[in-house]
Amino acid sequence: MWIIAKLTCREMLLRRVFHIAFLLTLAYLALYGTALHYAYRSPVHDVFVRNIMATQLTSMGLYLSSFIVAFLAVLGSVGAIAAEVESGVIMTLLVKPVRRRDYVLGKFSGLAMMLLAYSALFFLAVIMLNVFFSSGLVQINVLNIAKAGLFYLSVPLIILSISLWGSSFLPTLNNGVVAVILYSAATIGGIIEQVGHLAKQAALVNIGVVTSLLLPVDAMYRKALNTLFAGAPGDFTLFFDSFFTGKYEPSIWMTLYAVLYMGFFLWRAVAVFGKRDL
Amino acid sequence: MAAALETMNLTKYYDKQVGCRDVSITAASGHVFGLLGPNGAGKSTLVKTLVGLIRPTSGRAMILGQPLGSSAVYEKIGFLPELFRYQEWLTGRELLGLHGRLCRMEEASIGRRIQEVLEIVGLVGAENRKVGTYSKGMQQRIGIACAIMNHPQLVFLDEPTSALDPLGRREVRNIIQRLKNEGTTVFLNSHLLSEVETVCDEVAIINRGRMIAQGSLKEFLNKKLEVRLELTGETPALAEELARLSKRIERQDNEILLEIDTNERIPLIARRVVETGAKLYKLQYRQISLEDLFVQLLEKEGD
């Protein structure tokens, strides 16, 4: 399993999509940092306005980083198995003492390591930029960052698990389309759910819950943000209810569901691929 | 001789379509076994089933004494697929190292074996180039190198010469011969009859998913022997004698075509012709080629 994991890591590091993503991430962080620099130097000293600004800038930075991480997870994993089946590479690997289960788990481990490292760096970079430029307005304790990080990092893992499952029986293109549609539905569903809470419309909230059940990435992202700012001093969390953030935190059951969701689709990927004719 | 591979009524259906049906073959250990068949006959399905890439619908198979799908088998076999690609971003040396590790070879022996297989397939000097830069022929060779990296007891080669020029084909034949000399059993899937005829000890012919003939190559080629005589002065006694010595006679002007069951009859036929006083102008012996036999069998199947 570890040979496959190592091979997968190495392949991903050599892939152009990863290089482009890395460079664009640096560009994004540079742009975001510049924006923060000027935003936090605003002559407006009204605490109310500055808190709104800090909330919006932090949450927007994390929201877009989560979005980029999710798409990298999709692009990196939709063809993890399918592309090797289509090219014939897999035939040379599986006629070796490599169990199919180990092949799938090796793929998952390799991709997970790369995505987790990338996501963790991205997550920390966005937070640190806000802490650095806000001159004390944004204060987040380390424990919150660690706990929120776990929820944040679950987003690429959830996408990876369902995408790997799709890759175990679908062609790369079809799997990519399904993954992007599911992610889009989950994201829109999350926004609808927030609107539902604000408008006190149970139907809208239910739509959000259903899309979260289909792909619980938006729920986990919101859980991460709520955890990150839990117990933040002053009025920082007061205005923490934009569509990019959402002060309505998913329940512990949704967290449990997300963990089971990952496990279930990883298990299905192993089971489906184990029986597939190549 | 012990069987390296034995299948019993091995069958694979894709939904309702036949991949292969009731295939029962035996490949003796240390032999080169050739699987022949037209395109779409089920050759690749059979090979993929034997190496565990496809699950059989029914039937059984034993490979190196282990049931089909047993994980212990994979340490002892090698496989070169027909349509394959390797990790193009690895160098030849890295690719072979990867296959050595996947085969659970000891780290210390991997480097030595890489050098050996590079020499066998003639890729010394190209081992540090990325596989993606290799020509088709070189890719085929590195594929063979990967297949034999773990000193397999049984190697499956699925159309190993399909991308090669005549010189490359000859080199692959030499590699197969070398493997045989080292005691490795080779299961060769090919539609190139001349290639099979040159290197195989045993042959099986598959058509429409069914095995239509199998046996040793010698048996196959001795199945139909023809002697063409050009003579004058044939007496009734000679005609009777020729009929007795042959399985079938055809006459055309001064020519007589005899189908015989063994080439031991040839000197006897010559002696009888001379003894009866006939004048023998020509005696031509012809052994049926594998290609003729293949075509005849397929035509018979088509009837």
Image (tube, coloured by chain):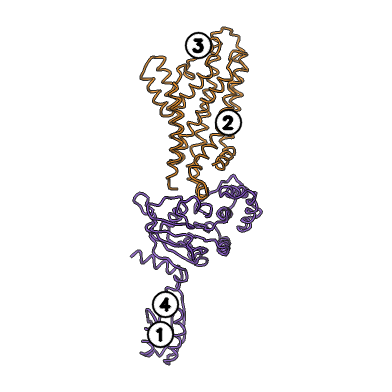
Chain colours: A orange, B purple
Question: Residue A58's image quarter?
Answer: top right
Respond whether the residues carrying marks 1 and 2 are from the same subunit. no
Q: Chain of mark 1?
A: B
Above or below for A217 versus B286: above
> Which amino acid type is shown beneath numbered disc 3?
Leu
Query: Where does the image place residue A71, in percent across and percent down from the top left?
Result: 51, 31
Query: Where does the image place residue B163, in percent across and percent down from the top left?
Result: 53, 56
Asked which secondary structure carries label 2, the reply is helix
Residue behind mark 1: B254
Distance from the alpha carbon under mark 1 to that under mark 4: 23 Å
Res A238 label: 3
Res A168 label: none
Residue behind mark 4: B261
> Which amino acid type is shown beneath numbered disc 4?
Asp
- Label 2 Cα crowd, 10 Å radius (few <14 / some 14-19 / many 20+): few
Above or below for A137 versus B158: above
- Earlier residue among tags 1 and 4: 1
Distance from the alpha carbon under mark 1 to that under mark 2: 88 Å
Query: Where does the image place residue A19, in percent across and percent down from the top left?
Result: 59, 35
Q: Chain of mark 4?
A: B
